[in-house]
């Protein structure tokens, strides 16, 4: 679909551990050989619980291969910070999108889909579709 | 006319006021939030004051855009992107004029408040900062900075009987009733600082 460039995935959580672990989980479930660029942006720069626009911007820049960047978030300030950066600023790479998806399930779906070389719209759709899977 | 100095004074006065009231803001945030509103905003507005001192932007729009960007990057909680968007959008709406009229500022601030509503999805009555900001902008149009201050303070007090419908407090449902909203309270401080910057 694209010219071999993969969509980058950024995982934003209030907690550095949650973001890093979900990144690891998603890459692990997508298969050991996955080359999809995935970056975690968890917690504040000081290591506390919260959201850091600097960590988000750095993560997005790190995974940008020119095919777009899909950002998944947990809740509250993580959502609002990404939205504020997208709406007002120039801190994020062109073609960065906040994906409306459940954090863990969406991350797995996004990484698996990005690994196939799918474009940003397909990655976004796969992550969003994770909402439709009911557990009960 | 309001020049860059006025807007710097506004931000400095806000930083001083948030410093004075940080404990009260955090106390209000304890029963219905995560008890960090005062310290988060204090860190943010201190950084704003320091940045403005250092970079000394020379138009009203540049002062507010820089302040907003600083808040987004230093607050670490939801109030960062919300207040950051308020100031950044207001600053953008002011363009690059060297000075603006009160009416132009009121119009720009309304654009900023609209952007906050879009970002957070809150409407008046949801027990948020919007409940102080919307009445303040309405009053600013008609009665200037002191009228805006009164309207914002009344708006913040009026959040007490409301049930929160946005943010973390909304998880508490009916238990959020009876507490004054910390975001509306800090918004009233921001608006009150306008009158202070204007020498009223």
Image (cartoon, coloured by chain):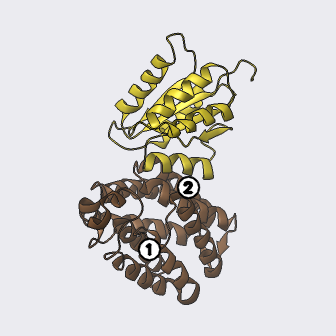
As drawn, B66 above or below B108 = above
Q: Residue B86: x and y, percent?
A: 53, 63
Q: What is the chain letter for disc 1?
A: B
Q: Quadrant of the N terminus of chain A?
A: top right
Mark number for residue B66? 2
Residue located at (64% from left, 19% from top): A116
Chain A's colour is yellow
Q: Pointer 1: what residue?
A: B125
Chain coloured brown: which letter?
B
Q: Nearer the viewer, residue A9 or B28?
A: A9
Residue at image location 56% in from the left, 29% down from the top: A110
Residue A15 circle label: none
In the rendered view of the protein, which quadrant contains the C terminus of chain A? top left
Name the residue: 26% across, 65% down: B175
Q: Are marks 2 and 1 on the same chain?
A: yes
Disc tally is 2
Q: Please report contact status of discs 2 and 1: CB closer than 8 Å, yes or no.
A: no
Residue B190 drawn at (x, y percent): 43, 70
**Mark 2 residue element:** helix
Which percent across, then down, holds residue A124?
Answer: 61, 36
Where is residue A102 shown, x and y percent of the image? 47, 39
Q: Earlier in the sequence, mark 2 or mark 1?
A: 2
């Amino acid at each position: 679909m694209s010219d071999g460039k993969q969509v980058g995935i950024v995982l934003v959580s209030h907690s550095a551990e949650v973001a890093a672990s979900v990144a690891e989980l998603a890459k692990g479930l997508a298969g050991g050989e996955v080359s999809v660029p995935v970056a975690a942006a968890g917690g504040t720069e000081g290591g506390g619980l919260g959201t850091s626009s600097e960590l988000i911007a750095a993560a997005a820049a790190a995974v940008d291969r020119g095919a777009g960047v899909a950002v998944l978030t947990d809740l509250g300030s993580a959502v609002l910070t990404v939205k504020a950066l997208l709406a007002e600023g120039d801190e994020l790479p062109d073609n960065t999108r906040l994906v409306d998806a459940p954090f863990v399930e969406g991350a797995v779906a996004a990484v698996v889909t990005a690994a196939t070389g799918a474009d940003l719209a397909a990655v976004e759709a796969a992550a969003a579709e994770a909402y439709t899977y009911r557990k009960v | 006319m309001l020049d860059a100095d006025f807007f710097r004074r506004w931000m400095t006065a806000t930083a001083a006021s948030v410093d004075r009231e940080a404990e009260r803001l955090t106390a209000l945030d304890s029963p219905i939030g995560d008890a960090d509103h005062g310290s988060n905003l204090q860190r943010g507005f201190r950084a704003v004051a320091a940045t403005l001192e250092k970079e000394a932007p020379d138009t009203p729009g540049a002062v507010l855009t820089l302040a907003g960007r600083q808040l987004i990057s230093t607050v670490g909680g939801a109030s960062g992107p919300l207040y950051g968007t308020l100031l950044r959008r207001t600053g953008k709406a002011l363009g690059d004029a060297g000075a603006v009229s009160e009416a132009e500022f009121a119009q720009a601030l309304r654009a900023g408040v609209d952007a906050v509503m879009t970002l957070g999805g809150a409407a008046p009555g949801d027990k948020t900062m919007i409940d102080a900001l919307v009445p303040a902008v309405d009053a600013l149009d008609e009665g200037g900075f002191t009228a805006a201050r009164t309207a914002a303070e009344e708006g913040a007090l009026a959040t007490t009987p409301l049930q929160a419908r946005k943010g973390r407090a909304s998880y508490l449902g009916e238990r959020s009733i009876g507490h004054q909203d910390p975001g509306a309270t800090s918004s009233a401080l921001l608006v009150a600082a306008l009158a202070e910057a204007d020498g009223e």
